[in-house]
Amino acid sequence: YRFRSKKEVGRFLESLKKTNGNETLAIGELRGPKKPNKKTHKMSTTRKTPSPWYKVLEYVEPSRIISDSDGKEHGGNEEGEAETNKEETNPEPRLLTNGHVKPIIKKGEKVYARWSGGTGWNWFPGRVWDVKESPGAEYGPEKKYDVVFDDGDTEPNVGEIWIAKKADYEVCLEKRDEEDWIGVKNVRFPDSKDEYARMIGWYETCLDGVQRVYSSLGEALRAHDKHIVKTKGRNNCLAAELNFPEEHHLLFE
């Protein structure tokens, strides 16, 4: 299927997210709303400054790399399509004994990712075009992502440590230093062969003596806040005890 504009690429990515990464259904939904008349679509003659990097011109059916995992994605799609058509978006890594699960980033999801142009350290907003897995070890499959940035540029094979969900990235910008976190600590494994475990790691809380592990910093921080509000009571909480007191502003009015 050949895309005719960046707007159409955006529509496809939205459809891809709605269909849980099913490319056939996404393209079918993209074609569906089109009007039956055969009027020629006139392309705009105005263009922004051309980029020396890739532009999305045509969608090519990606090859699927199936992991050794026997797990299947939860909650199949509404059309009743066999879940075996979703290997690349399988949210459950192989059976883990350590409880540390990597973030699940699906096709069409909004993300921030590193762009290799410029200094090579700049992160920009975009969406996931494709997800590819290769067998991993103790922390599940290792994934690479093809990303379409909001300006139309693309970045193939983005590693796990160079991409984050949009909401998670924004929390990390707001709470850069671990000293700013209340009740949460970052746990990494320097000796692991898994790059994500060595460089990014997970976020742990210990609430009422129960240790919980999160792949999202925001989820861990909010779990702590929820626990404080629940155990101390709404009238006994202090803003200084919470990571996001602004989300509980009614408590402090």
Image (cartoon, rainbow, N blue to C red):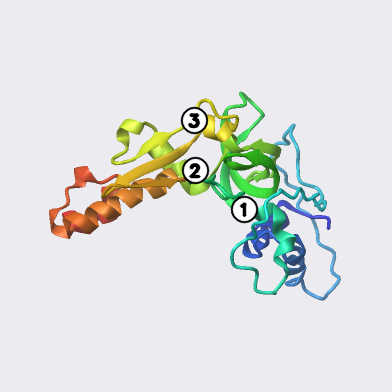
Residue under circle 2? 98
Give the mark, 3 or 1, whose residue is nearer the N terminus.
1
Q: Secondary structure at mark 2?
A: loop
Left or right placement of residue 157 versus residue 160 in this view: right
Label 3 secondary element: loop
Q: x%, y% of residue 128?
A: 65, 48
Identify the residue at horizontal 47%, vertical 48% (top origin).
167
Task: Please report whichever mark, 2 or 3, sits nearer to the chain's N-terminal start.
Answer: 2
* Residue 238, placed above or below residue 235: above
Q: Nearer the viewer, residue 156 or 187?
A: 187
Per the model, the C-alpha gap separating discs 3 and 1 is: 25 Å
Marker disc for residue 172: none
How crowded is the residue under tag 3: few (<14 C-alpha within 10 Å), some, or many (20+)? some
Q: In terms of secondary structure, where does tag 1 sit? A: loop
Which residue is the extreme one toward the front? 97
Residue nearer the viewer, 8 or 138: 138
Q: Residues within 10 Å of mark 2 (few under 14, many from 20)?
A: few
Quarter of the rendering occupied by the N terminus: bottom right
Residue mark closest to the camera, 3 vs 1:
3
Of the 4 image quadrants, the one containing the C terminus is: bottom left
